[in-house]
Amino acid sequence: MYILAAQRDADAMAAGERYAAYLRENAARFPKGALSLAQSEWYFNFFDHHCPHDAWLEWVRIDEPATGERREIRRTSLTVRLLGAYHDGYIELHYPEVTSYRLDMQGVRGGHRDWRYDEFRVSDEGLLVHEIEWSGYRDSGSWLITSSDVEYRWIDGSI
């Protein structure tokens, strides 16, 4: 891990430099959508309205689109919608072909709290590994999604 809480809290500048080096070294193996986000100027810029940092969960949806004569050929996709940190639009992250996920949260009575930090990594098999940390007043949580890639969408709309 490179830029999650433990690494940022220890030395944010060094963590960012190590992550940038990791992205450069593994760019050819990375799924295109995830690499584009990770290397963009805005995705990890907390002042950019399109950045997910401090966004709030609106919903998460897990689908199993099916094909085949008996609808027996199945795949899993996952979509997350966030209210942007500046409340002027929504972020949707769509994972088209999920191979595994873990959504681990404690104490969600008041909601999922803030999307704190996240990072994209690539597995040995060339799949996207997206780790997300949530943060609140007392409890926090983490999500770990492994997928073919991620698709980002911004939806304008002040509330």
Image (cartoon, grey):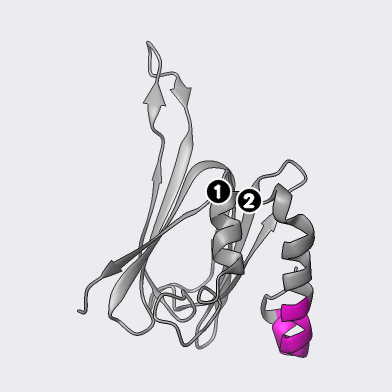
Nearer-the-camera pick, 120 or 39: 39
Residue 133 in percent (x, y) is at 58, 72
Secondary structure beneath label 1: loop
Where 17 falls versus 35 (above or below)? Answer: below
Q: Which residues are magenta?
A: 6-17
- Give the residue at x 70% y 84%: 8
Type of amino acid under label 1: Asp
The disc label shown at residue 17, or none: none
- CB within 8 Å, label 1 to label 2: yes
- Give the residue at x 50% y 76%: 42
Secondary structure beneath label 2: strand
Cα–Cα gap, marks 1 and 2: 6 Å
Type of amino acid under label 2: Leu
- Residue marked by disc 2: 128
- Give the residue at x 32% y 69%: 90
- Residue marked by disc 1: 149
Q: Left or right of 54: which side holds 27?
A: right
Nearer-the-camera pick, 53 or 152: 152
Residue 106 in percent (x, y) is at 53, 70
Residue 88 found in image quarter: bottom left
Residue 107 in percent (x, y) is at 48, 74
Q: Is residue 144 visible?
A: no
- Give the residue at x 73% y 41%: 125
Q: Disc count in the image?
A: 2
In magenta stretch: residue 11: yes
In magenta stretch: residue 59: no
Residue 70 found in image quarter: top left
Q: Is residue 119 visible?
A: yes
- The quarter of the image holding the N terminus is bottom right
Where 142 falls versus 95 (above or below)? Answer: below
- The quarter of the image holding the C terminus is bottom left
